[in-house]
Image (cartoon, rainbow, N blue to C red):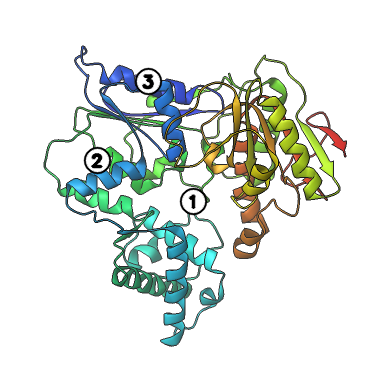
Amino acid sequence: MPANGHTVVLGTAGSGKTTLAIHRAVYLANPTTVHGGRTLLVTFNRCLVAYLESLSGGLGQIDVRNFHQFARGYLARRGKMKHGSICDSDLVEALCRQAVKAAISAGERSAVLNRPVEFIVEEFRWLAQNGIRTLNDYLRAEDQGRLGSRLSESDRAVAFSVYERYLAIRTASGRSYDWDDLAQTVLSEMESDSDRRLYKHVVIDEGQDFSPVMLRSLAAAIPADGSLTFFADMAQQIYGNKFSWRTAGLSVSDRDIWRFEENYRNTKQIAQLALAIARTPYYQGVPDLVAPKAPIADGPLPALVAFKSEVEEMGFVAQRAQKLAETGTVAVLFRDREPENQLRRRVSIPAKRLHRELTRWPSGPGLFYGTYHSAKGLEFDSVFVPFASKAHLPHPPHVVAFGPDEAAAWDVKLLYVAVTRAKSNLVLTHTGDSTPLLPPGTGLLQRSWR
């Protein structure tokens, strides 16, 4: 791949994108070459940063960061980042509720004001992630990548009024940013920043979860003779909106797009289940999907085990996961954080939580637990997916906020991520009916009842 300009690498799960991203960063940072320069290896979540650092070995000219670490560091150097100036997700939701109430009190009338707060929060995320800052931009904006039903022009006018109220309330509370509009400030600063760029090269891993504004800000962070390399699997786009890197303004021709089709991680049985999930109707309309070639490694069929109660279900998962962790890496993955305590109470060995506080990646066999989101980019010998039931997937609050089709389109990608973390053994469990997100048909799962 060339050492200047923009390059896109699209691959399937287990195709070596993360490994090659590290090698790419090493190549670009090599000081003995004419193109060598300081390189940023950037990903989305902080847990994956620890994993990348463990693989790369702390190489000198490479900085491994998640996007928000990069953004905060840059804005701090520009004098734009005070302590405590970023809203967390809970505060964003509370301020959105306040903004809706203020709009109603001011006499605003629209059906959008009666939507669940999750819908309002997601709409504001979409505005920030696309860099939409005026009502005219909002009215002209296409719905590409947007989660939820299309809003009418009059509803958009009211929604934007609420958005402006949210921004005003947030500023009054002493918060300059939330995690979604941070990238727009970085981009604006980059456009007026004439100083020498800190990085000559940027390598993006798990790029499918970067918003268009994030990608534009990273493209602006390199000099004219630098490079940006974008690694992504669009099947793993799990943060709600269905963005395409093509909307981010990267200068990429067809010859600059590479496709990795070989799956080196999963057994053919796990890969076949993952491919069947990606072929369900919930994946329709996802751009740039790369269909994997069937791996040759053999293994047992993924198991789908039914239980009479969730108490029995979690007891089974804890017992089996603990046993397998004696000789291999095991992950227990949940849709949300709430069930994590149930697992902790049932295991007698140390278990590592997949979370941003995990700053050093442990070596050797062991038990890990966390959400589907936190496991992104990681791999384990065995994976357990509890609560794969109709009652939990799709996520009921998302069904209420966005409707069953959008909620299913969101959670099917999360399920795909969870399934493809397993190298050899995969066990899904449920109480009551299993989730409708699993593909129908025989030969993909070994079903049993307890």
Q: Residue at x 43, y 81 (%)?
A: 103
Picture coordinates of residue 301 (x, y %)? 77, 25
The residue sitting at the front extreme is 348
Q: In the depicted view, which residue is nearer to us: 7 or 385?
A: 385
Numbered mark located on residue 145 in the image: 1
Q: Nearer the viewer, residue 294 or 375?
A: 375
Q: What is the CA distance from the residue labelled 1 to the residue labelled 3?
A: 36 Å
Q: Amino acid at mark 2?
A: Ala
Which percent across, then down, holds residue 130? 38, 54
Query: Does residue 159 sit above or below 146 in this rendering?
Result: below
| Residue plotted at (13% across, 36% down) | 196
Disc on res. 57? 3
- Element type at marker 2? loop
Q: Is residue 201 left or right of residue 20?
A: left
Q: Position of residue 389 (x, y in %)?
A: 75, 48
Q: CA distance from mark 2 to mark 1?
A: 23 Å
> Callout 3: helix, strand or loop?
loop
Q: Quadrant of residue 251?
A: top left
Marker disc for residue 357: none
Residue 361 located left or right of residue 346: left
Who's the residue at 73% across and 19% down the image?
299
The amino acid marked with disc number 3 is Gly
Circle 2 crowding by C-alpha within 10 Å: few under 14, some 14–19, many from 20: some
Residue 96 horizontal/vertical position (percent): 44, 70
Residue pointed to by mark 2: 220
Between discs 2 and 1, the one toward the N terminus: 1
In the displayed structure image, the side of residue 91 where residue 353 appears, left or right:
right
Q: Residue at x 56, y 72 (%)?
A: 115
Q: Of residues 37 and 108, which is closer to you in this image? A: 37
SS label for mark 1: loop
